[in-house]
Amino acid sequence: MDLDRQRVLRDAIQVLIRNWHGHATVPSRSLYPHQWSWDSAFIALGLQHVSPRRAALELLSLFGAQWADGRIPHIAFNPAVPDEAYFPGPSFWRSGDRAGHPPIATSGIIQPPVHAIAAAAVSDGLGADGPAFAARAYPALVTQNDYVRRHRTLGRLAALVHPWETGLDNSPAWDAPLHAVPADLSLFDTYTRRDLHHARGSERPTNEDYARYIRLALAYRDCGYDDAIAQSSAEFLVVDPGFNALWAWSELALAALARSIERDPEPHLAEAARITAAMVEELWSSERGLFLAKDARSGRLLPERSVAGLVPLLLPGLPADVVRVLRQTLAGDCFRGQDGVRGVPSFDLTDPRYDPRRYWRGPTWLNTTWLVAVGLETHGDAQLADRLKADIVALVVKAGMREYFDPRTGSGHGTSSFSWSAALLVHILAGR
Ligand code: 2M8
């Protein structure tokens, strides 16, 4: 390993150690001082190379925040951190008011289900202790996906009630449905944004969009997080190709976990095939060259090209012509075709709304770039997958463990010492 790689590996491990708070890892000590759902899955993938036991605990501690209905909330709050350290905090979400709440305070929305993938990897790395871990993780993961299937599907695919549930919170793909939600700036008489204390305003969502996020979260909370009521009255309801692809991919990981503890993998394989087929029928656009999100309120596909539309490459069951077109789109002007682009930009470089430094509106993120790289490997394109991984290493060597990166200059943005950037770097340097 060359000196640069040795240096960033050491730095990454230090970030993971510093951000560990005893049973889980915060995404960032300043901007995100609690446990986040999909962050923990990416973090566990990296942590397994440092301490397989810590990686297992990371996931088990998140499963401890699971609700009785099966949902794994997008934030598990650390009781030792004051309410005002992050907004919206525990006093906003009021998870304790709802029957079947877990022993600690949590948010009420969800995030993409990447946890089974992490659990399957961690279980493999635990050696003789793997089956015992798998036996504990498996029921939580099955219930997590059952919740999505039973409470969140509209027709055949999962629908999300808040941009934060997609993980790509501020993507221009959400502009049209989100801008139909009133932006009530008087909400800031009651609530204070905390993100702007830790990150530049020019790199974060606007106040108007933040007011919409608050309104949507309040509406979901005030209907008691009841999904039937929420879906029938939702001001925002989208079917996201990234979330649905990760849901299908997680069923494949569940099949592997099931096998490892002598359970039947078949229902998981069938579910993955069902979701994959539904995605191709409902979200594929040969015209735009990738999967699109759908506005479930109008039934219309949203035309924006975002990295979420490339994430379904992870699915081995895609038709060959879909894979071919996805690879062309990835290599074309919208994502990688232009000189000097590193990783996979989160949004279409040719769209006037592309912004290389504002969160999820264009920067390269390491998690989505890694997911696309694994998708390429799934379909036999190890060469481009390796280039994406080399880009990830190069970005970190140049700018450190930043939250996101300008795709063309490689400069780092958002928060520093960001856990999933560190974890995925460790994972890639371990040859994954
Ligand atoms: C960002 O989202 C949170 C809300 O969940 C925020 O902006 O306050 C997103 O990048 C999300 O995908 C991520 O899980 C979270 C923590 O890293 O930060």
Image (cartoon, rainbow, N blue to C red):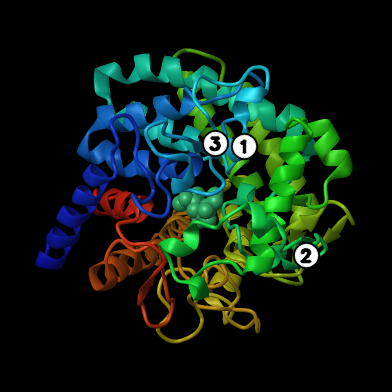
For image coordinates 72% across by 60% down, the residue present is: 186
Label 3: which secondary element: helix
For image coordinates 72% across by 67% down, the residue present is: 175
User: Disc 1 to disc 2, how far (Cα)?
Assistant: 29 Å
Labels 3 and 2: the sequence-earlier one: 3
- Residue 22 lies left or right of residue 84; in this view the side is left
- Kind of residue at disc 2: Leu
Which dot, 1 or 2, sits closer to the camera?
1
The residue that mark 1 highlights is: 93
* Location of residue 77 with respect to 378 vertically, above or below: above
User: For residue 299, which quarter of the picture?
Assistant: bottom right
- Residue 70 lies left or right of residue 429; in this view the side is right
Would you say the beta carbon of the disc 2 residue lies within 8 angstroms of ligand 1? Answer: no
- Kind of residue at disc 3: Pro
The residue that mark 3 highlights is: 90
User: For residue 40, which quarter of the picture?
Assistant: top left
Disc marking residue 302 = 2
Q: Nearer the viewer, residue 229 or 312?
A: 229
Check whether the beta carbons of the residues at disc 3 and disc 1 lie within 8 A of each other: yes
At label 2, counting other C-alpha atoms closer than 10 Å, the crowd grade (few under 14, some 14-19, many 20 or more) is: many
Labels 1 and 2: the sequence-earlier one: 1
> In x, y percent, where is residue 317?
62, 45
Quadrant housing the N terminus: bottom left
Label 2: which secondary element: loop
> In x, y percent, where is residue 329?
60, 72
* Location of residue 350 with respect to 92 vertically, above or below: below
